[in-house]
């Protein structure tokens, strides 16, 4: 069974950078994409970024475009989210997600990112 483990969250100041990691294990051969979502207190979970294996196509939410970069290391089965120029409104729990060819989306446990002003 596929498992996702996120790391790299923390408390930073506005303008700082963070890199989140998401390591996948347990049979990822049917995966087609991985991405990141986030959920701020009192708000619904929202899309942040996605990387499709076919063609290495990346997609970003408008709110993070130009500041965040999603990438992967195939050898490590790991996806990264490089977050630059962080803003207080980026504060949220960030969740890694894996999409499979067949089956439901797999979620990680989440990692907290807090940006102080």
Image (spheres, rainbow, N blue to C red):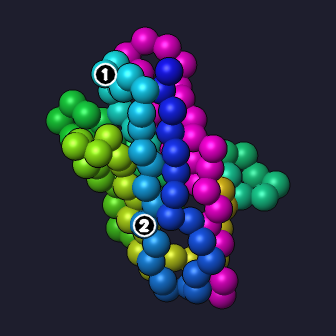
Q: Position of residue 99 (x, y in %)?
A: 44, 27
Count of numbered circles on the image: 2
- The magenta-colored residue range is 94-117
Q: Where is residue 51 in the image (x, y as percent from the top left)?
A: 33, 42
Front one among 16 and 10: 10
- In the drawing, what numbered circle is on residue 29? 1
- Whether the magenta-drawn stretch holds residue 41 is answered as no
Q: Residue at x 46, y 72 (%)?
A: 18
- In the drawing, what numbered circle is on residue 19? 2
- Label whose residue precedes the other's in the sequence (1 or 2): 2
Mark 1–mark 2 CB contact (< 8 Å): no
Front one among 9 and 45: 9
Above or below — where is 10 with respect to 31? below
Q: Where is residue 112 in the image (x, y as percent from the top left)?
A: 65, 62
As drawn, which residue projects farthest toward the top? 102
Label 2 neighbourhood size at 10 Å, few (<14), some (14-19), many (20+)?
some
What is the C-alpha distance between the residues marked 1 and 2?
25 Å
Above or below — where is 11 with respect to 100? below
As drawn, which residue projects farthest toward the right? 42
Answer with left or right where residue 71 lies relative to residue 88: left
- In the drawing, what numbered circle is on residue 6? none
Q: Is residue 68 visible?
A: no
Q: Which residue is drawn at 50% across and 39% down?
A: 4
Quadrant location of residue 41? bottom right
Say which quadrant the C terminus sits in. bottom right
Above or below — where is 103 with respect to 112? above
- Whether the magenta-drawn stretch holds residue 115 is answered as yes
Q: Residue at x 34, y 60 (%)?
A: 69
Q: Can residue 93 be seen in this view?
A: yes
As drawn, which residue projects farthest toward the left? 55
């Amino acid at each position: 069974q596929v498992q996702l483990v996120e790391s790299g969250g923390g408390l930073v100041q506005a303008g700082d950078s963070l890199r989140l990691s998401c390591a996948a294990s347990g049979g990822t051969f049917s995966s087609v994409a991985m991405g990141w979502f986030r959920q701020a207190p009192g708000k619904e979970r929202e899309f942040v970024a996605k990387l499709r294996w076919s063609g290495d196509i990346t997609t970003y939410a408008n709110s993070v475009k130009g500041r965040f970069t999603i990438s992967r290391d195939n050898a490590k089965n790991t996806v990264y989210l490089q977050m630059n120029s962080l803003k207080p409104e980026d504060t949220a729990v960030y969740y890694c997600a894996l999409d499979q060819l067949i089956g439901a989306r797999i979620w990680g446990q989440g990692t907290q990112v807090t940006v102080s002003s």
